[in-house]
Each structure stands twice: as C-alpha cells, then as structure tokens.
Image (cartoon, helix red, strand yellow):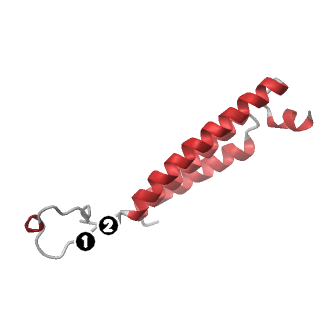
Amino acid sequence: LGNFSYWICMILILIGLYVMIAKENLIKKIMGLNIVHTSVFLFLILLSDKKDGVAPIIVYPEIVPGVVEFVNPLPHVLVLTGIVVAVALTAFGLALTIKIYKKYGTLDAEKVMEL
C-alpha cells in the first residue's frame, strides 16, 4: 500500500481490460486499449522517478555541485516510442472498424462474428 500512484495505474489497467473484454462495441474496445496504453505509460514514468533527481543535462558543471542523482532518460524515451506505436495502432484499429462497419453495417463484435 506504499505508493498511491502505482495503485491508480493498476486500477486504470483493470478498467481498460474490463472495457476490452466486457463491451461488444468495437470503438469501445479500442478506447479500452487506449486506457491500458496510457496507464502503462504512466506506470513506466512513475517507476523512473527519483527523489531529488535532476535531468541528465548539464551545460555548466558549476551549477550542479557535488554528487547529484540523475533521472534515467531511457524510460521516457521508451514511453515516447510507445506513444507513437499506440497512436498508429489506434489509427489502424479505427480504419479497420470503419471497413467493418461499411461491410457489415454494425460495430457489435458478436454480430460481426456471426456474419
């Protein structure tokens, strides 16, 4: 029960999974996937945080004297890459949803599977 923000991320992941599993509308399933993406990105950023950490950019070394804790920039870069992939996946999913709607006339996943 230590860090409250980690629990919020886990709750958001569970909400996204619930929406993807329980809802039959394809648009809602894509929205649930986006909730999962966003909560995983938030969790990765929260994991990379350090108390009293600074950005690893030092132009003038005399500004930051002594031993300094630097924040690891790798998780931030991975999250930026993940955001690009998530946007592309969302666009692809929505394009497929439009094609499915034009062909079958419905966005209900159960009805599409029956047809």
- Visible residue check, residue 42: no
| Cα distance between the residues tagged 2 and 1 | 8 Å
Residue appearing at x 26%, y 61% in the figure: 55
Residue 100 place in picture, x, y as percent: 78, 31
- In this rendering, which labeled residue sits more in front, label 2 or label 1? 1
Q: Left or right: where does residue 54 sit relative to residue 32?
A: left
Visible in this render: residue 97?
Answer: yes
The amino acid at mark 1 is Glu
Label located before the other in sequence (2 or 1): 2
Tell me if mark 2 has few (under 14), some (14-19) or many (20+) residues whose alpha carbon lies within 10 angstroms of its own.
few
Residue found farthest to the left: 62
Three-letter amino acid code of the residue under disc 2? Lys
Q: Residues within 10 Å of mark 1 (few under 14, many from 20)?
A: few
- Where residue 4 sits in the image (x, y, percent)? 43, 58
Residue at point 31% right, 65% down? 71
Q: Secondary structure at mark 1?
A: loop
Question: Could you tell me residue 54's position as x and y percent?
Answer: 24, 63
Judge whether 78 appears above or below 99 on screen.
below
Find the residue positioned furthest to the front: 59
> Label 2 belongs to which residue?
50
Using the image, tell me which numbered label, if any, was put on residue 13.
none
Residue 69 is marked as 1
Give the residue at x 83% y 26%. 103
Marks 2/1 in contact by CB < 8 Å: the verdict is: yes
Quarter of the C terminus within the rendering: top right
Q: Tell me residue 2's x, y (percent).
A: 42, 66
* Residue nearest the viewer, comparing 42 with 87: 87
Q: Is residue 115 above or below residue 63?
A: above
Say what secondary structure mark 2 lies in: loop
* Residue at 51% in and 47% down: 84
Residue lying farthest to the right in this orientation? 114
